[in-house]
Amino acid sequence: MILPPLLLLALTGSSATALPADRYFTITVVDEATGRGVPMVELTTTNSVRYYTDSNGIVAYHEPGLMGQRVHFQVKSHGYEFPKDGFGYAGRALDVVEGGSATLKIKRVNIAERLYRITGQGIYRDTILVGGVPPTPSPVINGLVMGQDSVQNAVYRGKLWWFWGDTGKPDYPLGNFHMSGATSPLPDQGALDPDRGVALSYFVREGGFAKEMAPRPEPGPVWLDGLVVLPDETGQERLYAAYTRVNPQMEALERGIMRFNDDREIFEKVVETDLKASVHPGGHPFIHTDGDQRHIYFPHPFPYVRVEAEVSALLDLSRYEAYTCLRDGSSLDSPQIDRGPDGEVRYAWRRNTPPIEPKRQEELIKAGELKEDEVLLQLRDVDTGKAVAPHSGCVYYNAHRGRWITIRSEIMGSSMLGEIWYAEADTPVGPWVYARKIVTHEKYSFYNPKQHPVYDREGGRIIYFEGTYTEFVSGAPERTPRYDYNQIMYRLDLDDPRMVLPVPVYGLGKDEAGLFRTRASLPANHRERSVPFFAPDRPAEGLVPVFEVRSVDGATELRVGPDTSGQLLFYALPADTAEPPATAVPLHVFVDNAGSRREYHVEQSNASTGLTRQDKPLCLVWRSPTRLRWE
């Protein structure tokens, strides 16, 4: 569809240099698997002029002197591949003519699919230049925002509310450092299809630039996180947020809780908290009910801080709890590990006691205070077993998987802060172990990823998340025009075969009717359970089902392969798998002399006396790095 000139000018906000749409050569780069346009693909000519596809995957090309010529474009993008020729060039020569077009197919290496840019200038710039119709009402500039850092959002009073940190503007390098905000409709209230875009309505000040949503009279930027909606004493919804005011070195000068004033449309300080407190609210919280207890969990780095889901508790740090192995009142400076009479480390929810962050966890291991299999944070690459150092991210319950899932950035991975991982756990606190990388960047950061459960589709099979794309602390040689320091949306299909991950398989003990169970089939009376190994709970190519069957004499036995007479327990790799992942270990069979008693263990030391290990293991499962017992 070709837009009329007056509408084109209205959408672009410009009366200047745009050519008629039929003068451009339209280059569209699409995902070869989905056919959808891919944003942020770099096209480079032989004289090093670079162009970047907009959020529809389009480049509007018009270069005086090259129109009517054959022009070669090298093609590259983070997490995508383009075929190389015999000389190693990933690109293609195109016959560039006015009004012409070409489509390039690019292979996605990322498991997650890049959808569009949410913030900043020129989101659908090239779509408009070639006469296309953008999906959003403000496709090239909104709130005069050029760039925005780190999203926070919450469902509040019938809308989705969005807030961002430091925000750039067109007329000066320094912009708004006291949070910006916007709203958008909810999916059932007329929102755009999340596959297409987000229609943001910014809060703006005079002149049209995004207004300060958390103004403070004292100097220093103010950052909000930990957004939570709670009823006040009248039962009316109120929106709260944790705030931090920082100095130029990004060190905290002040912390506390703010509340949104709906009349003034700004956040106002309610309480200032102690900077030296053992716990603070932060991250992307969720409310979870366990039994008759309803808590707000703050997942930074994981949901190891919580408080009762009521306003009086939220405002009082003395009522916050940390899930920790430190004794009550212990500090990180002089940690005292809580151990039971048997020497086993004990984790519990404790007040006035800090959680153990990843860096401190490593220090305690090196100091000999904790063993590697005694710590909570055990994230590792499912294929290589390499430890994944978690940075920021989010945790939410996913109904499709029936588990808690995390989308999380990695610090010091193959890039400084540009790798995004997915993992699952049976409870909010864990065990978090095997993870899969779903997004990668080469020398570029993509931090503070935030999933949007409100956009979940097909019961959570399709999920959406965004993150901040920036060259900050990345080592990138140059910034990506328009995309840098802005938010980019991704989509992830949890039924992608690559997303089949090993989950905890719990041991029931030798005296129980069965041997192993995943969480979905655990007996209700089993509260604390060991995790002897991990294994997938759903089929995938290369996996075999493992069943529990009863022999005629009542003995319990595990068998590999279809056996509808037994109970399906989990899936595993065949014992003779040629090149198993580094994380795979044999599940051995141990039998007594009469052949009537069997046990199954990864470690021979766990087998009962008098049993002999068979030569061939039953199957291959995934190593358990944790000796903790989980409820």
Image: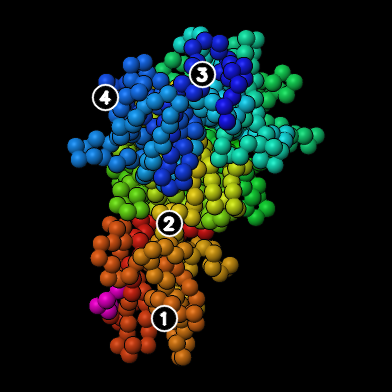
On the image, numbered disc 2 is attached to which residue?
Answer: 497
The alpha-carbon separation of the residues under discs 1 and 4 comes to: 66 Å
Disc nearer the start of the sequence (3/1): 3
On the image, numbered disc 4 is attached to which residue?
Answer: 46
The alpha-carbon separation of the residues under discs 4 and 2 comes to: 39 Å
Front position among marks 2 and 3: 3
The alpha-carbon separation of the residues under discs 3 and 1 comes to: 74 Å
On the image, numbered disc 1 is attached to which residue?
Answer: 557
- Specify the segment rendered in magenta: 613-617
* SS at badge 1: strand
Q: Residue at x 52, y 63 (%)?
A: 519
* SS at badge 3: loop
Q: Disc 2 residue type? A: Pro
In the rendered image, residue 614 lying in the magenta stretch gets the answer yes
Residue 402 appears in view: yes
* SS at badge 4: loop
Using a 10 Å C-alpha cutoff, classify the residue at mark 2 as few (fewer than 14 neighbours), some (14 to 19) or many (20 or more).
few
Residue 9 appears at what percent x and percent y? 58, 16
Q: Are marks 1 and 2 in contact (CB under 8 Å)?
A: no
The alpha-carbon separation of the residues under discs 2 and 3 comes to: 45 Å
Disc nearer the start of the sequence (1/2): 2
Residue 186 appears at what percent x and percent y? 67, 37
Q: Are marks 4 and 2 in contact (CB under 8 Å)?
A: no
Which label number is shown at residue 20? 3
Disc nearer the start of the sequence (1/4): 4
Q: Disc 4 residue type? A: Thr
Front position among marks 1 and 4: 4
278 or 228, which lies in front?
A: 228
The alpha-carbon separation of the residues under discs 4 and 3 comes to: 26 Å
Using a 10 Å C-alpha cutoff, classify the residue at mark 4 as few (fewer than 14 neighbours), some (14 to 19) or many (20 or more).
few
Residue 29 appears at what percent x and percent y? 41, 36
The alpha-carbon separation of the residues under discs 1 and 2 comes to: 29 Å
